[in-house]
Amino acid sequence: MKHARVICDGREQRGTSHEFGGQPDAAVRLDDGRVVPQGQLTWLTPLAPTPRPRTIFALGLNYADHAKELAFKAPEEPLVFLKGEGTLTGHRCLTRRPAGVQFMHYECELTVVVGRTARKVRRDDAYDFIAGYTVANDYAIRDYLENWYRPNLRVKNRDTCTPLGPWLVDAADVPDPMALALQTTVNGKVTQSGNTRDMIFDVPFLIEYFSSFMTLQPGDLILTGTPDGVVDCRPGDVINTEIEGIGALMNTIEQGPA
């Protein structure tokens, strides 16, 4: 099932994906039974609030073609950085491009939502610890980049820089997360395409790897990286990052202060 968290009638409400106008996922069936088209809702991230700050892991250079695109050797172990929860924003929301920036690009990423406490998990058991999946668009600002192996805070931790959603899809409804097509469009033009099977470090490996030295908690996120094909995004651009079976996440760029 695909779950959503939205604001309707001035209050937060929950619901699930629903067909509208003959189009799948075009509306939300709220818990009160009403069916509301996407455009009439204010979207929140699909994640349930947690009583603590959630840990957000983000993978860099986890697709060999993207590493090659950036003229880097594919990493021999996961290249990981952490993000603050304040970076997250919802479907159909705005992301600010700082004034004076020369290159800001999207990153379409399959995102894993941890479902239960995980410590010392074996690879073969990894899927048992996943609640579901969603789509992230993890924008990066190359102007601020000091080193691809150690992106500084301004590259990946600005407010609104990581749209997430629209749906949280139950893990049971994703038979093979390692065989999903990814696609990004900018103003309706396809600019990126790939498949999760091309990850260097797959989802079970990442669960085993992280839980080998730290405890994963319910609600933690793992953003698994992006394939090649990133382009500069300008104010007014409408970006759609879509993953097969998970959803299409729409976001618009607005001009912001420096």
Image (tube, rainbow, N blue to C red):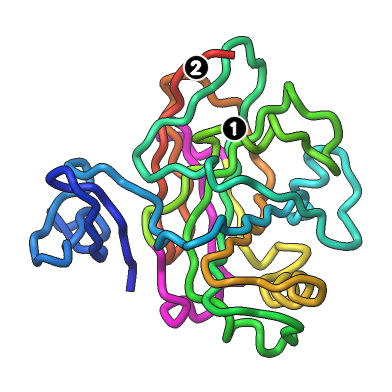
48 or 252: nearer the viewer = 48
For the magenta stretch, what is the residue range?
168-191
Image quarter in which the C terminus is found: top right
Say which amino acid is labelled 2: Gly
Question: Contact, CB < 8 Å: mark 2 with mark 1?
Answer: no
Q: On the image, which quarter does residue 93 sit in?
A: top left
184 or 189: nearer the viewer = 184
**Residue 258 among those drawn in magenta:** no
Crowd rating for badge 2 (residues with CA inside 10 Å; few <14, some 14–19, many 20+): few
Dot 2 falls on a residue whose secondary structure is strand
Say which amino acid is labelled 1: Arg
Q: On the image, which quarter does residue 112 sit in?
A: bottom right
Q: Which residue is identified by label 1?
A: 158
Q: Residue at x 47, y 62 (%)?
A: 50
Q: Residue at x 61, y 32 (%)?
A: 105
Distance between the alpha carbons at the discs numbered 2 and 1? 11 Å
238 vs 113: above or below: above
Disc marking residue 256: 2
Q: Residue furthest top?
A: 100
Q: Position of residue 104 (x, y in %)?
A: 62, 26
Q: Residue at x 39, y 45 (%)?
A: 90
56 vs 156: above or below: below
Q: Residue at x 75, y 78 (%)?
A: 208
Left or right of 205, for residue 159: left
39 vs 198: above or below: above
Dot 1 falls on a residue whose secondary structure is loop
**Residue 174 among those drawn in magenta:** yes
Earlier residue among tags 2 and 1: 1
Q: Position of residue 182 (x, y in %)?
A: 54, 55
Q: Position of residue 214 (x, y in %)?
A: 76, 71
Q: Position of residue 246 (x, y in %)?
A: 43, 63
Counting labels gives 2
